[in-house]
Amino acid sequence: MRSCRQRQRLDTHLRNLGSKEKDEKLSRLIEAISTEQARLHEALARLDAPPLPKPEIIASPMETQHVLEHLKTLLAMDDAEANILFSTSGTLLQQTFGAMAEQLGQQIETFDYSTALKTIERMSVSVADKENPTP
């Protein structure tokens, strides 16, 4: 938008100025337009840039179980710290449990701690099964 206004100003000034005045104002307007075009190109380049990949977290069953136990303790006490713990450990849990972790996150976000506790019980059983597979 600014580039269009500056182009119009440049056109108007070129038609109305004397030669010495024309050179000075012309240089300033060209510089202003060049700066705006550079900003526009930078912004457009950021739009086309592919998103950065998310770092991969390798979840260990032991670490996952520890997070679940800590969440379970907080949720049992109706402690809002559970929200903070989930926000910092959510990626680990989502990598391990997928949709179930997303469901847990929604339950914690809405302070539905009793339902979240039931979800954690199901998740804990899943982790235990991974640690001790039956032959």
Image: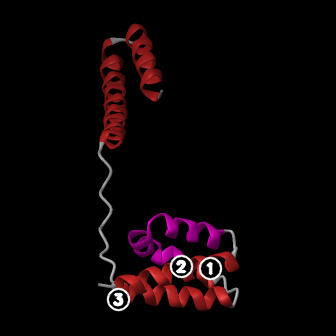
Residue 20 occupies which quadrant of the picture?
top left
Mark 2, Cα crowd under 10 Å, few <14 / some 14-19 / many 20+, is few
Q: Nearer the viewer, residue 81 or 33?
A: 81
N-terminal of the pair, mark 3 or mark 2, is 2
Image: magenta residue range: 86-109
Q: Secondary structure at mark 1?
A: helix
Q: Magenta region's main secondary structure?
A: helix
Which residue is at a point 29% across and 68% down the rendered structure image? 56
Which residue is at a point 56% across and 83% down the rendered structure image? 121
Is disc 2 in contact with disc 1, using a CB cutoff of under 8 Å?
yes
Q: Is residue 45 magenta?
A: no
Q: Amino acid at mark 1?
A: Lys
Residue 104 percent across, percent down from the top left: 57, 71
Which residue is at a point 44% across and 79% down the rendered structure image? 126
Mark 1, Cα crowd under 10 Å, few <14 / some 14-19 / many 20+, is few
Please give the residue where the numbered disc 2 appears in the rendered image. Answer: 122
Residue 133 percent across, percent down from the top left: 33, 84
Please give the residue where the numbered disc 3 appears in the rendered image. Answer: 132
Residue 94 percent across, percent down from the top left: 44, 69
Please give the residue where the numbered disc 1 appears in the rendered image. Answer: 118
User: Does 85 sit above or below residue 4?
Assistant: below
Residue 107 percent across, percent down from the top left: 64, 70
- Name the quarter where the C terminus is drawn: bottom left
